[in-house]
Every structure is written in C-alpha cells, then in structure tokens.
Amino acid sequence: MTHLQGIAASSGIAIAKVYPLEAPDLSYSKQDIQQPEEEVKRLHEALDTSKSELETIKEHTKKQLGDEHAEIFSAHLLVLSDPELIQPIEDKIKSDNVNAEAALDETANMFIDMFKNMDNEYMRERAADIQDVTKRVMAHLLNVTFPDPALINEEVVIVADDLTPSDTAQLNKQYVKGFTTDIGGRTSHSAIMARSLEIPAVVGTKNITSQAEKDSMIIVDGINGDVIVNPTDEQVAEYKKKQDEFEEQKKEWAKLKDEPTVTSEGEHVELVANIGTPEDVEGVLNNGGEGVGLYRTEFLYMGKSQLPTEEEQYDAYSSVLKQMGDKPVVVRTLDIGGDKELDYLELPDEMNPFLGYRAIRLCLERDDIFRVQLRALLRASVHGNLKIMFPMIATLDEFRQAKAILEEEREKLNNEGQDVSDDIEVGMMVEIPATAVIARQFAKEVDFFSIGTNDLIQYTMAADRMNERVSYLYQPYNPAILNLVNNVIEAAHAEGKWAGMCGEMAGDEIAIPILLGLGLDEFSMSATSILPARTQIRDLSKKEMASYKEEILSMGTAEEVVAFVKEKTQS
Ligand code: PEP
Ligand code: MG
C-alpha cells in the first residue's frame, strides 16, 4: 500500500484499476530486411488498426464534444488513406530493403519538414496531422500501447504526469472513474474541467506516476486529496462506505434543485455556473443553476486543427443561449494562452506564458480572430440574455479598444440588416491586480465586473497556479485578496453596477460567507458546487456576515480569517 497526498480537485471517490496515460517509447532500430512483402503487410496492418481506432475516437468525440471537435480525426483519417503518403513508404521498404518502422519514420519526416516550411498555413497544419498519425502507426508497428482516453472500455483511474484540457475533454465518464496527476493545482484547467465532468480528481501528487503500475488498484479521494495505491481490503471497504455517503449527500443537496437561493433573512443570492461547452449546460440545469456566469469560449478553439468559423461559433453560442432561456449567460471572449494552447496559431514559446501574449492582448492584435467571435456573439444575442466580458484586461485603454471593436461589429451587422439585441451588457474580468486597485475608474465604463480569482490570486501572490510546489500560496482567504475583492465590489456598487465572481473561490465553503458579507452580487462556480452552496447559504445571515467585514479585512493572515469564519458559521 502506498499513500500520497495531493490537491483535492474534483469531489467524489474513485476506486478502480490504474490506467497510465504516458507517451509511449517509440524508438526503433533500422533493419535490413529480406522479405519486403512481409513488411508492407505489417505496415498495412498497423494502418488498419490505427484507422479503426481513429474512427472510434472520432465517434466518441462527436458524442462528447460535438461535430467540430471530431473534425480533426477526419483529417487524420484522410492522412492515413492518402496514397501520396502511403505509396512512398511502401516504395521505400521495397527499394531500400528496410523495415516498415524506418520507412514510415523517414518518409513521414520528409513530408513533415516539407510542409512545415511552407508559407501556407493550411499546409503547415497538415504537417501537424502527419506527425500525430505517424506516432499512432509507429506504436502499432512496435506493438506498444498508444494510450488514448477515448479508447478505454473498462473502469479505470487515469494516472498521468499532467492532463491537458483537451485530454480531459476526451474522458468518458462511463469508464474513467477518476484521475490523478503529478503536477497541477486546484485552478489548473484540467481540474476545472474534471469538476464540470463530475469526475473525482486529485492533482499535484508530485510522483504518482512513479508509484502506480498499470492495472494495480488505486483509490482517489477527491474530497480530501488522498491517493492510495494497492489499498488493503479494509481501506477498500472504508472508501466504498465514503462513496455511499457522498452519494447520499448528493441526494440531500438535490432536494434544493428547484428552490431559490436565499439567505436566512430571505435575501436572494444569484448562483450561476461556469461552463466550457454547450454540452455543459445540461449539468447546469440539473444542478439548479440560475444562469451561466462564465462561458469559457476558448474550448471551442482547442482540440482542433484550425480556427472555428463564425457559423460554428454562432451555433455554439446560440445553443447555450437557447437552452438557458431568459436566464443570464455571460460569455467570455477568447482567453487563450497560459495552460490553454492553440497549436495551429503557432505562437512562439514564452518564458512565462501566464504573463505573456494571451487573451485580450492577442485578440486586440489579431483582431481578425476577435471580430469573427464578436460577430458570432452579436448575431446569437437575439436567442437569449447575453452578456459579454473581456478577459485579462490590464488597462482602461484595452477595455476601451475591445469595446470599440465590438461596437464597430455591431454597426456593420446593423448595416447588413442582421438582428442584434440592443440590451447586451458589456463587462470585464478583474483578474489582474492593477484593475482591482483602480476598480473605481473602470466601474464608470463597464456594465459589470466578474472577479477571476484563479488568476487574481496567482498574480497577487506571484505564485504560478499550475505549480504544486507553490500551491500553498493559492490563498483565497488571504486578507490581501479579500481587500482587493472588497475594493472591486465597492467600486461597482458606487457606480450602480454589479460585481460577480467566476474564479473557483466563488464556490468555496469558507469564502462564501465572507463574500456574502462583502456584498458580492453573483457567485459563479462549477455546476456541482451550486447545490452545496445553496444549502450553505440558507443557513447564513448576510447582515451578520456584513457586520464582520471590517474585522476580517483588517486581519493579518489567511489562517486568522479561516478560524474566524469557522467560529462564526459552524455552530
Ligand atoms: C479566473 O482566472 O479566475 C478565471 C475564472 O478564468 P480562468 O480560470 O479561465 O483563467
Ligand atoms: Mg483567468
């Protein structure tokens, strides 16, 4: 039995076999061969297996994430059937008398180099496709497993160094009972997605990949952050009991699904959800969400080989708005960068991606990309209650520029005779301390604020949100953070605007009473946090919490704040 402590990232308990998700060793030796026909046959067998796997993955992706995300696999399938790639590999086997591995590698690399150096973006994307599919075919030639979450067909817990947001999006809940990683923090995007998918997860264990062998039993406790490899029978029994208790607890919470969120004095509090795709809306409604407080649109751009078209975006935004009816939907414009990459944009590597060329910074420079998104949003606005916000605003000038581009696109659509709602609030994320400090000035120009504490905390504490070694500095209750949050809420209210929060802090049990007292208007969280938060808020008095405001804001440490809140709320 091995016990590891990590960061609880998505609640629930998983007990299943280990499925390591790691890049396979694809090294091979080049060999002279006597029977080229045999090698050609091996090549075609590997190609056929790869094709049938890609068909499965494509179907799975279509179901889980929609047609656009499945397109990349159609492109991969085309590569595998392209005689212009396959014939030269066969020719090489026959003319050079080399094994299939060498012929595949050398021929594919020749095409990859050729395409990569072309001016044409489309051809450069083909280089990436060839690179991807060649790895799969090579794995089959070498008889090594090419791990792929979409191909899993038995109950497992995924163990990986890290999971990218697109890996996470591929996970099939039916079989993937949980996951655990070496690196990452509670606010890394794979953790956030695990919560939307309701898959228990523990991240940042530092070394689970070296402790867990394929097929051994593992327990992942996403409530407390424990991971146990090769548990004893007693431990399995103990965690099965915990699993049952968690299910019972969920049933209790579910009773409040159609109830309003009110404090003990009967004041309404708005509880809305964060989503990444139109498919997540079902979870929001099932968990009694009163709206969407953050739609992370970048997932529409990820896991693909090219930018989504205006029509694709229009369909996705309209689908969310229609499903939510007259409930508010806050859509955030493209926030790429940090841990969310777009390979096809081929942006240069940066020393500090979270401080780099990302989100609104990229959109203002690449306004060709930004305008397509804004047009799609404006056109979709007639289908519901849309609000638009810009991510990573650092200066007033950035907000003004982004808003001016939005207005230009609105005018163009008006001139084209397209219907656009004339009641779209335009706000911004407050996630850079510079904007929280002078929130008063911003409040005059925005319709609302949404405080993004995942980034606000990492920038205020100077602690990378992905780095488990500094995760102790992710301190939502640190008075420095609480004072910034208070400043933003007061600034909004002074100008008659509203302030919400869409960082993970908004769904945090200790933070909720404090935020209630500070007067936060809207709490946006993972859908699964809504019912526990509603249950908690019914027992809290906003008036009482507001009376502690000055005392809390003048405290010196996060620990003092936690002790104080516990004393006042957990009688
Ligand atoms: C945040 O930074 O708090 C936020 C909600 O945005 P993201 O987690 O997508 O960076
Ligand atoms: Mg952010």
Image (spheres, rainbow, N blue to C red):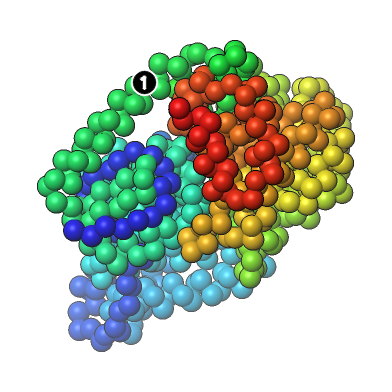
Rendered view: 40 above or below 58? below
Specify whether tag 1 is near ligand 1 (CB below 8 Å): no
Mark 1 crowdedness (10 Å alpha carbons): few <14, some 14-19, many ≥20: some
Residue, disc 1:
252
Tell me the residue at 87%/49% (across/down).
397
Q: Nearer the viewer, residue 23 or 387?
A: 387
Tell me the residue at 68%/49% (across/down).
480
Q: State left or right for residue 507 relative to residue 551.
A: left
* Residue 39 drawn at (x, y percent): 24, 73
Q: State left or right for residue 12 relative to residue 305.
A: left
Q: Nearer the viewer, residue 493 or 57?
A: 493
Q: Tell me the quarter of the image containing the N terminus.
A: bottom left
Tell me the residue at 48%/14% (across/down).
258
Helix, strand or loop at mark 1: helix
Q: State left or right for residue 333 relative to residue 173.
A: right
* Residue 365 drawn at (x, y percent): 78, 55
- Furthest toward the left, the residue is 233
> What is the tally of numbered marks visible in this picture?
1
- Asked if one can make out residue 1 in the rendered structure from this viewpoint, the answer is yes
Q: State left or right for residue 535 relative to residue 334.
A: left
* Residue 497 drawn at (x, y percent): 79, 28
Rendered view: 102 above or below 332? below
Q: Specify the amino acid type for callout 1.
A: Glu
- Asked if one can make out residue 307 in the rendered structure from this viewpoint, the answer is no
* Residue 158 drawn at (x, y percent): 32, 52
Q: Nearer the viewer, residue 504 or 416?
A: 504
Tell me the residue at 30%/41% (across/down).
13
Q: Tell me the quarter of the image containing the C terminus.
A: top left
